[in-house]
Image (spheres, grey):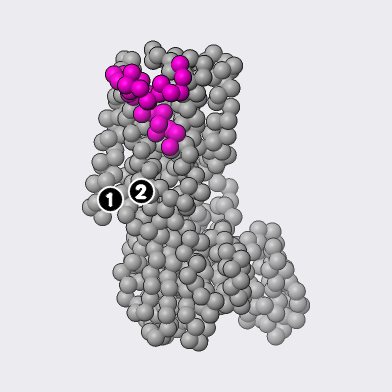
Amino acid sequence: MIKSVSIVPWCIACKNCESICPNIFKVEGKSMVINHNYKENIQKILKARDMCPVQVIKVEAESGANIDTKPLIWKVLSKVYLTPDTIELVVETKDFSFTAWQYVSLKMKDKHGTFNRSYSIATGNTNSFTLTIKILPQWRGWAFINTLKENAKIEFFGPEWSFILQKNTKPKVFIATGTGLAPMIAMLENTPENIQKTVIFWVRYESDFYYQDVLKKFPNTKIITTVSKPTENYTGTTGRVTDFLADITNDSEIYICGNPDMVESVKENLSKNWFPTENIYYESFVAAPPTPSVWFFENIFIEWNIPGIKALNWFFILFWFATPFLLKDGPLWYYNHAWDIAWWSVVFVILIRPLADLFPKLLLFRKLLIWRNGLWILSSAIILSYFGFNVYTNYSYYGIAPLDTLGNYFTAKMWSGKNIFPRLSEITALILFITSNNFSQKILGKNWKRIQKLAYVYFISGGIFIYSFGKDEALYSMIIATILYFAAVFKNWKK
């Protein structure tokens, strides 16, 4: 019936085919056909083909044979936004059954053709099941999911699974990021109440949390929800998944679902602590290839996939090494404008966070958050360089008298009148320069967040100092920053 099976380019190594039909497919970097005994694996081969998210499995039929399969057609019962970019999709079915950690493959269509995307089942019964789906404009399936309405007919293949919940009495630890929480809900529902359970749910921003009320309904369950990039007013747990693995006992079973970096970090951390690998079960999100023929304008100015955005942040971080030399022996324009560079860098740092909170659907602001650390370090380096010249070379800037010696720094003269503002900028710049790194965050714990609030002292003292020389833009920047800050606080408070 099947004449040949082959793999064409664009395999994303999602391992769907191997989990469905391990007798035929093996994934090592990419999918490979390892067996040509098609006759005894026909149905599984066709299922693997149909559920491939990028349609790289090509099956050729023998003359006169029909290898076309039909997806199941079901109806959308509801579509609810759990976060600004995560939806809950409830689908009506008939005589449906599934096992925890199983997934379905949703058939989609756009102007470039048909394609599939796989989603884990969160909950389900004989008449319906629930999916959680991340929707971002740069993803090919975004337009399809975004336009789905209630009662719309959609096509699925499956369900299928990568692995299943083990039936034993071992403590269970469920670790997830983003929509990786969906299969964990299914597993929690299928774990007996008497078994100790721990859930570690990690997101970047607190606005990404969902299903918090659902998690609380499971008895005998410890819930750890943590944020790696909290806003100014967030008071919950912060940190990464790996910060919460120390208390996991070696008799536990661990189930991990999320982005590949997180999965690999957790596995590596557990390995270093001699955790038995046979008790670790995991599934990684694998990115599909970009939408075919995406126009340059759409990619840059709508989806905000800005080339080199991460590299530019590293440029800002590394540039501080050259700052003292540029001020001393560099071009005159840098000597004359370094203070302005320091000021506008910190303006960006202060403004971008409330803008991202106020307009979560404008992806540009979230993309630019990555520059905060680099620009902050650059701004601090410039101020500290000025401080160094003031102490060691009797350098005078903006009319401020030189210190002559470091011992004069804390004299009343140096902290009176207009001198107080550059002094505050220098002190806060030093503290923040030293602590603006992951190592300090780990060492300081909750105190790190308190120290980072000195950024406002740095911003305000610098702004007042610049304004005292008749630069009105400093005053306008402080007013705008204040308005945006309180608007973001009010928005988060309403939530």
Residue 209 counted in the magenta span: no
- Comparing marks 1 and 2, which lies closer to the viewer? 2
Callout 2 secondary element: loop
* Residue drawn at the location 41% of the way across and 60% of the way down: 226
Q: Are marks 1 and 2 in contact (CB under 8 Å)?
A: yes
Q: Is 140 placed above or below 78 here?
A: above
Q: Read off the magenta span.
A: 404-431
Residue 25 image label? none
Q: Based on the displayed image, in which of its 4 quarters is residue 18 positioned? A: bottom right
- The percent position of residue 158, horizontal first and vertical second, equals 52, 76
| Residue sitting nearer the eye, 122 or 338 | 338
Residue lying at the far front of the rendered structure: 407
- Kindly identify which residue carries mark 1: 492
Of the image marks 1 and 2, the number of the one nearer the N terminus:
2
Callout 1 secondary element: helix
Quadrant in which the N terminus is drawn: bottom right
| Residue sitting nearer the eye, 386 or 334 | 386
* Residue drawn at the location 52% of the way across and 83% of the way down: 166
Residue 414 counted in the magenta span: yes
Residue 231 image label? 2
Distance in Å between CA atoms under marks 1 and 2: 9 Å
Amino acid on which the number 2 mark rests in the picture: Thr
* Residue drawn at the location 59% of the way across and 73% of the way down: 275
Q: Is 482 placed above or below 418 here?
A: below
| Residue sitting nearer the eye, 40 or 357 | 357
Quadrant in which the C terminus is drawn: bottom left
* Residue drawn at the location 47% of the way across and 58% of the way down: 240
Q: Is 494 placed above or below 396 here?
A: below
Q: Main secondary structure of the magenta part?
A: helix
